Image (cartoon, rainbow, N blue to C red):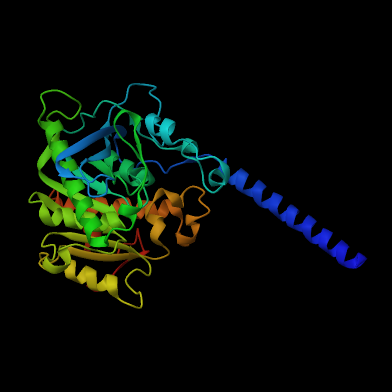
Amino acid sequence: MRWAKRALIGAVVLFLVILMAAFSYLKVQSDRSAVLPGPTGPDRVGRSVYVWADQSRMDPFAPNGSTPRELSVWVWYPASPAPGAPTASYWPAEWQRALGEGGGINDLLHTRPALIHPHAVEEASISDSQGRYPLLVFAPGQGLSVADYTTIAEDLASNGYVVAGVNPTYSVDVVLSSGQVVRSASKAENANYGQLASVWGDDMRFAAHQMDSLSAASTGRFSGRLESAGIGFFGHSLGGAAAVQACRHEDRCSGAADLDGRLGGDVLQTGLGKPFLFLGSQSSLSATDGALKTQVRSALRGVPAGQGHVLTVAGAEHYNFTDQGVYFDLVNSAFLGSIDGARALRISSRYLEAFFSSYELGHPDQLLAGPSSAFPEVRAEPA
C-alpha cells in the first residue's frame, strides 16, 4: 500500500510538471510577435474597411430571415502613405475592440492578432503610380476571415492591384455597422456547400459593384481610379468555390482562381467558360475518391484552350495558403505541410499575379507556360 501511494504521488507530480511545461511552452509561443512577409512590389500598401448592405438580397442565414445581407469588406490598394505613418494592426481597431482577445486557454493556442504585424497603412492615400488599377475580389475559407490572407492581399496590392476581401457574415465572427458583432451561426455552418458557394459568390459580385460605385463617385479615395472593364475573382477553400461561381455569373469576369478549394454550385453543370486557375496542395488531386479532380474537370468545360491551369504545390497543405503558416497556431498546424510558410505564400501570390496579369491585364506571363526553375515546388497536373 505504501508503494502504491508513493507511485500515485509520483504520477501526480509528473503530470503537474508536464502540464506546467506545456503551459509555459504555449505561453512563450503565443506571446511571440510575428511580422508577416513583406510585399514584393514597388508600391506601399493601404487598407480601408467598408460595411455595405445589399438591399436586393435577404440574408438566408440571418435569424429572422428578413434582414438584408450585410458585409464587412476590407480593401488593400497601392498607396502613398504620409511620411512616418504607422502600419495598421492585423485587425482594424474596431474589430480589435469588439472581438479582442478571447481570454483563457484559447489565447494560448495561437499568436494573438494584436501581436501579428502587417505592412499596410490604414486609410493611406492611393498611389499615383498608375492612373487606374485593376480590381480583384477575394473570399476566404469557411470559418476564416480575410485577415488570414493579409500577406497575399498586401503582395498583390504592392504589385498594382486593388484587392477587396469579403468577410462572409454568419460563417465567421464579423464586426458590422457601429461596432455590431455578428457571430458565426450554425445555420450557415451547416448549410449545403453549393448554397454557400452561391451566396458567397453573390457577395463577391456585390462587393465588385460597390467598388464600381466608389470609382464612379465624384469624390473619395477611389474616385476614377479603378479599371471597370474586367474583374478578377479568387478565393481559398470554400472561397475558391465562391470565386468560380461569381466569375461564372459576372459578365465582366476576366478569370477565376481557386486556392485548394473543392467546387460547388451550378458551375459543375455548366463549366466556367473563362480562364481558370486551380492552385492546390500537394495531395489535393490525388485523393482516393477523386472528387476534387472531377470537379476541376467540370469547371474546365468551356475554358478557352490554353487558359486552364491546374497546379499543385509540393510540401503544401490546406492552411499553407493562409497567414497561419508564418505565425504560431497549435490547432491548425496539423493542416500545414513541410514547405516553409513564407515560401508557400510567395508561390500563391506570384501565381495569382501571373494569372491575372495574363487574363485581366492582357500581359501574358511566362510563369504559366510550364515548369519554373524559380518555383520547382509547383507541378502542372493533367486536366
Give the residue displayed 53% in from the left and 53% down from the top.
330
- Which of 127/121 is in front? 121
Q: Position of residue 108 (x, y in %)?
A: 57, 45
Q: Position of residue 375 (x, y in %)?
A: 35, 60
In the image, residue 198 sits, relative to residue 55, either above or below, namely: below
> Left of 12 or right of it: where is 318?
left
Give the residue displayed 36% in from the left and 21% down from the top.
83
Q: Position of residue 369 (x, y in %)?
A: 21, 63
> Left of 319 or right of it: where is 267?
left
| Residue 381 in view | no
Q: Position of residue 304 (x, y in %)?
A: 10, 64
In the image, residue 297 sits, relative to residue 321, either above or below, namely: below
Which corner quadrant of the image does residue 373 belong to?
bottom left
> Left of 39 or right of it: where is 328?
right
Which corner quadrant of the image does residue 77 belong to?
top left
In the image, residue 253 sits, relative to residue 71, either above or below, namely: below
- Which of 46/199 is in front? 199
